Structure formats: structure tokens, C-alpha cells
Image (spheres, grey):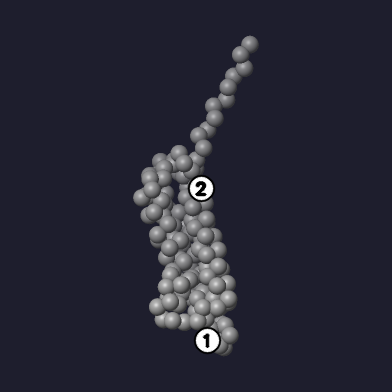
Amino acid sequence: IILGFFAFFQWEFSLPVLAAVLAVLGYSVNESVVVFDRVRETFKKKRNMTTPQVLDHAITSTISRTVITHGSTQVMVLSMLLFGGETLYYFALALTIGILFGIYSSVLVASPLVMWLGVSREQFVKPKKEKEEAVV
């Protein structure tokens, strides 16, 4: 998405912009890991929930963290965009675009994609092993 914006508007693509793209990739992957870790926890704790209910619960329980984390980061990036001067302008612009679309893709696209792929409880939770008794 960031590359598309820069190509469409013919903005300068430099090494700081590349650094911003890589930072956004890491940021988005981290957010997806947080959501799917919550999915794994919920599958373990609430065995009577269906997969869509578990995904909904995971997103609902992590959305406040997501808003606070991304909101505070966005405030910092917007201040760099407004007050950083020409040197930081495209870096901050790439981060602004990337963070907005990164939230969308990590939270609202990744979970339905998991449902579309047909992920089930068995893929997240290992079955409990039954204790074998010693034969005498």
C-alpha cells in the first residue's frame, strides 16, 4: 500500500522511506502475532466457542491495546510529519500511511482470512495426552 501511494503520487522514495516500510512490516506482523496468540489462548480456555466466536473474542479483547498503541505511535509520527522538516517528511508520511493500513490488515483482514482458510481448534490446541498405566 505504501509503495502504491508513493508510485501513484510520484513522491520521492529514499532510504528513510524504505526504513519506514520495513518498520511498518514489523509493526503489522507484531500486531497479527498478538491477535493470533489471543486466539490460541481463547481456544484453550473456552472450549465451547466456535471458531468465529473465538476470533471475535480475540479481536475484541485486543482492540483496546491496538488503539492505544497505534494511537500513541500515530501521534508521534504525525508530529514528525508536521514539525520534522523536509528530512523526515517522506519517512513520516510512509509511517502514517503504513500504520493506518497496517492496523486494518492485521486486525480486520487477517482474522477473516483465517476463517476462509478453515482453521480449527485442533490446529491451535494440542490434544491432552492420556496417562498410560504401567503393565505389571
- In the picture, the quarter occupied by the N terminus is bottom left
From the viewer's side, name the closer residue of 89 and 111: 89
For the residue labelled by badge 2, is the local secondary structure a helix, a strand or a loop? Answer: helix
From the viewer's side, name the closer residue of 83 and 48: 83
Where does the image place residue 111, in percent across and percent down from the top left? 41, 55
Q: Is residue 36 above or below residue 87?
A: above
Q: Is residue 110 above or below residue 5?
A: above
- In the picture, the quarter occupied by the C terminus is top right
Q: Which residue is mark 1?
A: 82
Q: Which residue is mark 2?
A: 41
Where does the image place residue 7, in percent across and percent down from the top left? 43, 77
Q: Is residue 118 above or below residue 13?
A: above
For the residue labelled by badge 1, is the local secondary structure a helix, a strand or a loop? Answer: helix
Q: Residue visible at 42% across and 65% down?
A: 104
Q: Amino acid at mark 1?
A: Leu
Say which mark, if any, is on residue 15.
none
Residue 87's quadrant in the figure? bottom right
Q: How many marks?
A: 2
